[in-house]
């Protein structure tokens, strides 16, 4: 019975890590899509973004409605990534399998 439980746990860990990889790529895609949808007149390499285009994600005033939707999806995928990595690590630490 313990081998079946170990197999189920292994499958769960693999599914969590695959979901984490997919969430990572979704974060990158949605982040770029949000950054590309700034309001007219916003310079991506200017003072408004502190010369870093990724800072447009942090200031919602710089994005259009489409950009805000992609920003929400980006932050949601970041949360999914963190959950997919943290939960298996927490389970492994609690059960003593993390070395």
Image: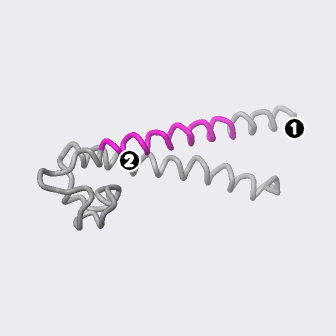
Q: CA distance from mark 2 to mark 1?
A: 39 Å
For the N terminus, which image quadrant?
top right
Residue 17 forms part of the magenta stretch: yes
Looking at marks 2 and 1 on the same chain, the residue that comes earlier in the sequence is marked by 1
Read off the magenta span.
13-33
- Where disc 2 sits, the SS reads helix
Measuring 31% from the left and 41% from the top, which residue is drawn there? 33
Residue 96 drawn at (x, y percent): 82, 57
User: Residue under circle 1?
Assistant: 2
Residue 6 drawn at (x, y percent): 81, 38
How many marks overall? Answer: 2
Measuring 71% from the left and 33% from the top, which residue is drawn there? 11
Residue 78 drawn at (x, y percent): 46, 50
The overriding secondary structure of the stretch rendered in magenta is helix
Residue 51 drawn at (x, y percent): 30, 63
Measuring 36% from the left and 47% from the top, which residue is drawn there? 31
Colour mapping: one colour
Classify residue 69 by image quadrant: top left
For the C terminus, which image quadrant?
bottom right
Q: Is residue 22 left or right of residue 29?
A: right
User: Residue under circle 2?
Assistant: 74
Classify residue 66 by image quadrant: top left
Residue 26 forms part of the magenta stretch: yes
């Amino acid at each position: 019975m313990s081998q079946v439980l170990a197999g189920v746990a292994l499958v769960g860990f693999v599914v969590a890590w695959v979901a984490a990889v997919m969430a990572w790529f979704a974060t990158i895609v949605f982040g770029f899509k949000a950054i590309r949808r700034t309001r007219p007149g916003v310079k991506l390499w200017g003072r408004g973004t502190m010369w870093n285009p990724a800072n447009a994600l942090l200031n919602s005033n710089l994005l259009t409605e489409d950009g805000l939707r992609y920003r929400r999806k980006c932050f949601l995928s970041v949360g999914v990534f963190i959950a997919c990595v943290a939960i298996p690590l927490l389970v492994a630490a609690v059960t003593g399998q993390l070395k």
